[in-house]
Amino acid sequence: MEATQTRVCMKATQGCRCGHLGDASLACSRAPRCAADYQAKVSGPLLDRIDLHIEVEALSAADLTMPPPAEGSIAVAARVAKARSVQGERYAGLGVRTNTEIDGDLLEKYATPDEPGQRLLAQAAEAMRLSARGYTRVLRVSRTIADLAGAGATGRIHVAEALSYRRQAPRS
């Protein structure tokens, strides 16, 4: 049996060449053109292969003194382990282990959202001009979000969260 391999693609870049896009205290003097020029260097097809796009802003001194988040790393790791276990059981004997690996009939069977989720995804696919690859990736991420939440089926809320992780237009 051929071993499957999970591929994760991550991209770490700044919003613009100077690195100050979105930072009110160090405003970019060329925004939004600086961001558009800088981000245009990364091709759309490459960006389409990245499932989660998350902007992380610089921490202020006040942020550093705040108490830690309510859910710590140990709790998150336990939730992830449980979700992976659920996926392993769901796909046992099917030649795949995780949501990342499903496509075709398996994708349709296990990741198709409920009716409101399907409507939202259809609207978003048109508005965001999702490619077939992007659409499939949203379905896989939605299914994973549902697994992390302990939900048996993929719903509108899971689709909405998955869509929030798609690439956002540059901001000034």
Image: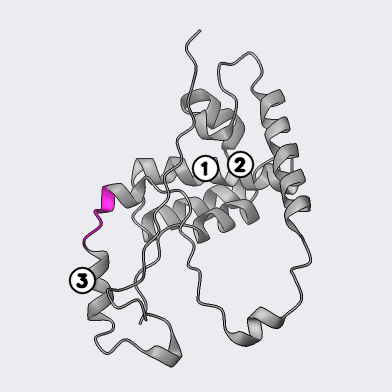
Of residues 133 and 41, the one nearer the viewer is 41
Of residues 95 and 128, the one nearer the viewer is 95
Amino acid type assigned to the residue bearing label 3 in the image: Asp
Residues tagged 3 and 1 counted as in contact (Cβ below 8 A): no
Mark 1 sits on what residue?
Answer: 139
Q: Secondary structure at mark 2?
A: helix
Residue 114, visible in the rendered structure: no
Packing grade of label 3 (10 A; few <14, some 14-19, many >=20) is: few
Residues tagged 2 and 3 counted as in contact (Cβ below 8 A): no
Tell which residue pokes out farthest to the top in this image: 1
Closer mark to the observer between disc 3 and disc 1: 3
N-term mark: 2 or 3: 3
Residue 69 among magenta residues: no
Residue 168, visible in the rendered structure: yes
Amino acid type assigned to the residue bearing label 1 in the image: Leu
Amino acid type assigned to the residue bearing label 2 in the image: Arg
Mark 2 sits on what residue?
Answer: 143
- The residue at 69%/42% (across/down) is 147
Packing grade of label 1 (10 A; few <14, some 14-19, many >=20) is: many
Of residues 155 and 116, the one nearer the viewer is 155
Closer mark to the observer between disc 2 and disc 3: 3
Task: Give the image location of residue 135, x and y in percent.
Answer: 42, 45
Packing grade of label 2 (10 A; few <14, some 14-19, many >=20) is: many
Disc 3 from disc 1: Cα separation: 31 Å
Q: Secondary structure at mark 1?
A: helix
Mark 3 sits on what residue?
Answer: 37
Please give the range of residues in magenta. 41-45
Q: Secondary structure at mark 3?
A: helix
